[in-house]
Image (cartoon, rainbow, N blue to C red):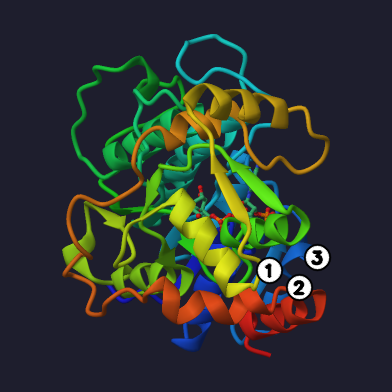
Amino acid sequence: MKIERICILGGAGFVGSRLVSQLAARGLQVRVLSRRREAAKDLILLPAVEVIEADVHDRQELIRHFRGMDAVINLVGILHENKVGRVDLPGARRGDFQKAHIELPRKVVHACGEAGVHRLLHMSALGANPNSRSAYQRSKGIGEALVREAGMQHIEHENWYLNGPKFIHGYGLDVTIFRPSVIFGRGDSFLSMFARLLKVFPMLPLASAGARFAPVHVDDVARAYADSLDNPATYGQTYDLCGPKVYTLQELVRYVGEVTGKPRRIVPLGDLLSYLQAWAMEFKPGKKLMTRDNFFAMCVDNVCSGGWPSVFDFQPAALEAIAPEYLRADTPRARYEGYRENARR
Ligand SMILES: NC(=O)c1ccc[n+]([C@@H]2O[C@H](COP(=O)([O-])OP(=O)(O)OC[C@H]3O[C@@H](n4cnc5c(N)ncnc54)[C@H](OP(=O)(O)O)[C@@H]3O)[C@@H](O)[C@H]2O)c1
């Protein structure tokens, strides 16, 4: 089936805005659902892109906005909870991870079924696993399993978490799931955060310094989505997406320091101090830099076991080819130019 109209949840975010740009450049019609239309204003001027302010957690709104679409892409995800809950106990306090990573995918699957949409692309994360020690990764793992089941015709439930009361299974959706390692690119929150910290602090005590990542460029992730949309070979598949090289966190932070002209001393912390630092940072008001849950996630390597999926006819970009340009220019003016570039204006 030719895919021409796509509805995207989370399309105004870091990955989403790059993906929307790529889809628009391919002449596709894109509908972005956002909680705040204002947050997506850079996308509004793109040809054939409409941004609709919507409550994506409302089932009826989802069904209404999905009607007439050929595909749905769900990119919604959060790294930190404001309202902390449990994702692994039925009836336990419901937190933000539960809502964004489990309940929302369930509603999306249901709404696809109701609206007659047959194609669904879902964003998970490398390391997502219903049995992870990290609630972020557990919730992502459960959400991923729900979506995978939506691609099946017949389902036998063995796990309580797949058996939510309103989950109607067996839609036979053509589902593709993506599990990227950490994503870099202009506007990222990972490398750019370290660039900002290195500007301020003369030395950096670094939690989980030995954690391993294979950073993948945001445009490569977006292209993998765009290329798989109407490629039947990707139906029912799950793809781990990694960049070409593996780095420890310490190597990455050192690299950011070199590139930005702030080669600070990095002091790697052991496990106990890493945990305590993460705990202490949870009390920081405003945007969180690190939590104990992030620490648990980083206890497991965030790297791919295989190479770049051969179904995608390109190779992922090297960090060194892209990062210097935007990390060196991390000034308010340069960030503004970056937003304009993202929106192709
Ligand atoms: N960035 C990475 O390194 C990385 C790595 C692996 C996986 N991922 C996954 O990739 C996806 C996109 O990541 P990103 O870096 O682009 O994140 P982002 O910039 O924060 O964008 C996420 C989007 O999700 C929506 N969203 C966030 N919380 C929501 C909530 N409670 N209810 C409804 N919508 C909500 C927001 O849409 P509106 O504000 O427009 O409503 C936002 O634009 C996420 O699922 C993330 O877990 C990211």
Q: Quadrant of the N terminus?
A: bottom left
In the picture, the disc for residue 41 is 2
Q: Amino acid at mark 2?
A: Lys
Q: Position of residue 54 (x, y in %)?
A: 70, 53
Q: Which residue is mark 3?
A: 38
Q: Residues within 10 Å of mark 1 (few under 14, many from 20)?
A: many
Q: Residues within 10 Å of mark 3 (few under 14, many from 20)?
A: few
> Circle 1 sits in a helix, a strand or a loop, which is it?
strand
* Count of numbered circles in the view: 3
Which of the two labelled residues, at mark 1 and mark 2, occupies the earlier sequence position? Answer: 2
**Residue occupying the point 63% across, 40% down:** 57
Q: Is residue 344 above or below residue 167?
A: below
Q: Which residue is mark 1?
A: 51
Residue 53 visible in rendering: no
Q: Position of residue 224 (x, y in %)?
A: 34, 69
Q: Residues within 10 Å of mark 2 (few under 14, many from 20)?
A: few
Q: Quadrant of the C terminus?
A: bottom right
Q: Does the beta carbon at disc 1 come under 8 Å from ligand 1? A: no
**Residue occupying the point 63% across, 72% down:** 260
230 or 279, nearer to the observer: 279
- Cβ–Cβ under 8 Å for marks 2 and 3: yes
Seen in the image, is 176 located left or right of residue 191?
left
Q: Residue furthest front?
A: 265
Q: Is residue 165 above or below residue 331?
A: above
Q: Does the beta carbon at disc 3 come under 8 Å from ligand 1? A: no
Q: Amino acid at mark 3?
A: Glu
